[in-house]
Image: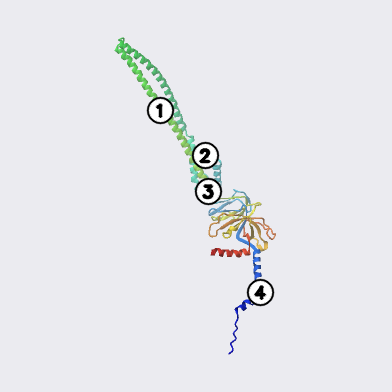
Amino acid sequence: MKDKDIWLYDESAYIKRKPTWMLRWGVILLFGFFVMVLVFASFFSYNENLNASLVLTTETPPAHIMSKHTGRILDINNLHNDTVISGDILAVMESTGNLQDIMSLKNKLTLNTTLLSDLTILNKHYPSNLELGNKIRPIYNGFLDAYRNLILYHNLNDKELKEVDLKRQYVGKNLTIQNTKNEILILQRNLEINKTDYDRYVELFEKGVVSLKELERVEKGYLSIQRQYSNVTKELYELNTELFKIKNNDLLFKNSGIRNKNAHASTLEFEKQKLLAFLKEWEEMFVLKSPISGRISYSNIWAKHQNLKKGQVIFTVVPIGNQKLLGRCRVPIRNSGKIRHGQRVIIKLDNYPYREWGALNGTVKTISEVPYPGDNGGYDVLVEVEDLITTYGKTLVFKQEMQGNAKIVLAKVSLLKRVFYQFREIWEFEE
């Protein structure tokens, strides 16, 4: 019986059999392609960029003057495109105070350091009919009251009369003390004489030369002189005590005068500084000044007596002159650690489409130390722009605060490194 068509193969036949030429060349080509890919990946590199929004401005940015409160605008002192300097008054908002009165009063308080000594001069220098508004008026009245009290304290004669009276008492008491001392000297000498006379009469009485009556008469005279001497000595002590009281009263009066003078001066200075603070607060609230020198540009305003809202931009002062161009951008936190000083920045402005005008070149100047707080936090980067000539050779016309996009060129990284970065992350995760 014939077996069915069953082919039996030895395993060694497969092992010893050579691969076909197609398989051999296929493996070689595949290996060569893999090697070429690795070589290409190691040499091929591309820029790693970080994109951010950008605002193009100058080293001195434009100043926006906003309304501090809701109300009407009364005076506008400049026209559109006028040149102003720092500190110029651009406009005045409506209020209950008069600008000229308030500014004049502020200048007097700031510049006048001489103390007025007469009420008439005070009334001329600081009149009471100034239009200062409801808030400043009570403070101004307090300042005038303090000034009047100080002037009255200096001008009244009570102090001089008291000083003259104390001096008169002091001189009179000194003269009385001197006379009393002279009287004591006389009594002291008289007492010595009477004591000698009394001792002599005692000896004579003991010898029987004089009678007892004569001795008693001499003794009575001696005791009378002794009593007078004691009384005058006591009087001198009382006079010295009174003189000390006069000196003490004079010292207390002088100290009291100094205290009163300092109290009036301190009150006046306090009221003056308080008034100045209210005047400056009114000026900040109702007077719109230019913080920088430049060219004024109107924003949302066209006439006097126009109603404005709090926080509304009224004017913009644009600095004039050749200044460095700067780009201010905020980059996200991710990859921000790779930003370095001097890195190239490619700037594409919205005002000038990139495909038509090209891009501007810049370099990273500074980066903030801490991120901006908030959900959309990031780092503020300052970009120094070389000039307004684009990569297409076109010159752009600069306008303040033009917006666009900034592409910060961080570094060139090869494709092979990119691949190994992924594997390194896997290896670190497994470890």
Q: CA distance from mark 4 to mark 3?
A: 92 Å
Sequence-wise first label, 2 or 1: 2
> Dot 1 lies on which element?
helix
| Quarter of the view holding residue 357 | bottom right
Q: Which amino acid type corresponds to the residue marked 1 in the rendered image?
A: Glu
> Which residue was labeled with disc 3?
281
* Residue at the disc numbered 2: 122
Q: Nearer the N terminus, badge 4 or badge 2?
A: 4
Evaluate if marks 3 and 2 touch, with contact meaning CB atoms under 8 Å apart: no
173 lies left or right of 371:
left
Between label 2 and label 1, give the one nearer the viewer: 1
In this picture the colour scheme is: rainbow
Q: Say which mark, if any, is on residue 242.
A: 1
Location of residue 34 with respect to 147 vertically, above or below: below
How far apart are labels 3 and 1 at the CA level? 58 Å
Measure the alpha-carbon separation of dots 1 and 4: 137 Å
Q: Nearer the viewer, residue 414 or 309?
A: 414
Give the residue furthest to the top: 209
User: Residue 298 lies in what quarter of the image?
Assistant: bottom right
Callout 2 amino acid: Leu
Foreground: 309 or 366? 366
Choose mark 3 or mark 2, whichever is in front. Answer: 3
Pick whichever of labels 4 and 3 is earlier in the sequence. Answer: 4
In the shown orientation, is residue 288 left or right of residue 359?
left
